[in-house]
Image (tube, grey):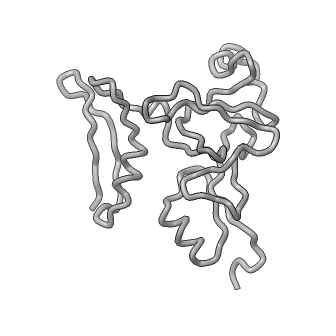
Amino acid sequence: AFGISHRFFISGGAPLKREYFRYYRNMGFNIMEGYGLSETTGPIAIPYYRKAKPGSVGRPIEGNEAEIRNRGEDGIGEIWLRGAAVMPGYYKNETGTKEVFDDNGFFNTGDLGTIDRDGCLYITGRKKNVIVLDSGKNVYPEELEFYFRQSALIADIAVFEWKHGGRAVVYAVIVP
């Protein structure tokens, strides 16, 4: 009887594991991930529930747009948003507003991601979480955690940077 009148469920606040996405879909529930920030007055991207893709937060809601800037070799870059759902600035904080908005009204979210051919947005991490190795390679902890969580041998994992001899080294704490 549960859910008979529900058309869909929205997950937000943290990435939805693909296994849970598939699990609920296989049970007949329409589930999808949404994306929003305090600065966007709630959701700004969400897929049409019948076209939701695992790992994607969908396309920006009508009247809003997303751009990926400063892409790396892997195609991942900074997520910038503009539109009706984006606040015009921080209240009585002109300096803070200038730090995150460009001259065209785009807001720098501080999140990293990609946009696919269909215009669907994928969040891959936070810019402040990126680990830059001596080689110049960018390591995204959230991506590694997602990858290793696919293993049935790993219950949970936390990937982080640890300075070793002045060099950035990637470490992980794993719960078997």
Q: Is residue 127 above or below residue 52?
A: above
Total marks in image: 0
Name the side, left or right, on which 65 lies relative to 130.
right
In the rendered image, the residue lying farthest to the left is: 165
Q: Decide which of 77, 100 is in the foreground and name it.
A: 77
Q: Which quadrant does the C terminus fall into?
A: bottom left
Name the side, left or right, on which 45 lies relative to 169.
right
Q: Is residue 43 above or below residue 64?
A: below
Q: Is residue 134 above or below residue 174?
A: above
Question: Going 72% across and 15% down the picture, which residue do you hit?
Answer: 103
Residue 10 position in % (x across, y down): 67, 60
Residue 89 position in % (x across, y down): 75, 24
Name the side, left or right, on which 63 lies relative to 123.
right
Name the side, left or right, on which 151 lies relative to 42.
left
Residue 39 position in % (x across, y down): 70, 34
Q: Dividing the picture into quarters, in which one does residue 84 lie? A: top right
Q: Which quadrant does the N terminus fall into?
A: bottom right
Question: Going 55% across and 43% down the picture, which residue do you hit?
Answer: 123
Q: Decide which of 5, 175 is in the foreground and name it.
A: 5
Q: Decide which of 41, 67 is in the foreground and name it.
A: 67
Question: Going 50% across and 42% down the picture, which residue do you hit?
Answer: 124
In the rendered image, the residue lying farthest to the front is: 117
Residue 61 position in % (x across, y down): 76, 45
Question: Going 37% across and 60% down the picture, which residue do you hit?
Answer: 150
Q: Dividing the picture into quarters, in which one does residue 83 lie? A: top right
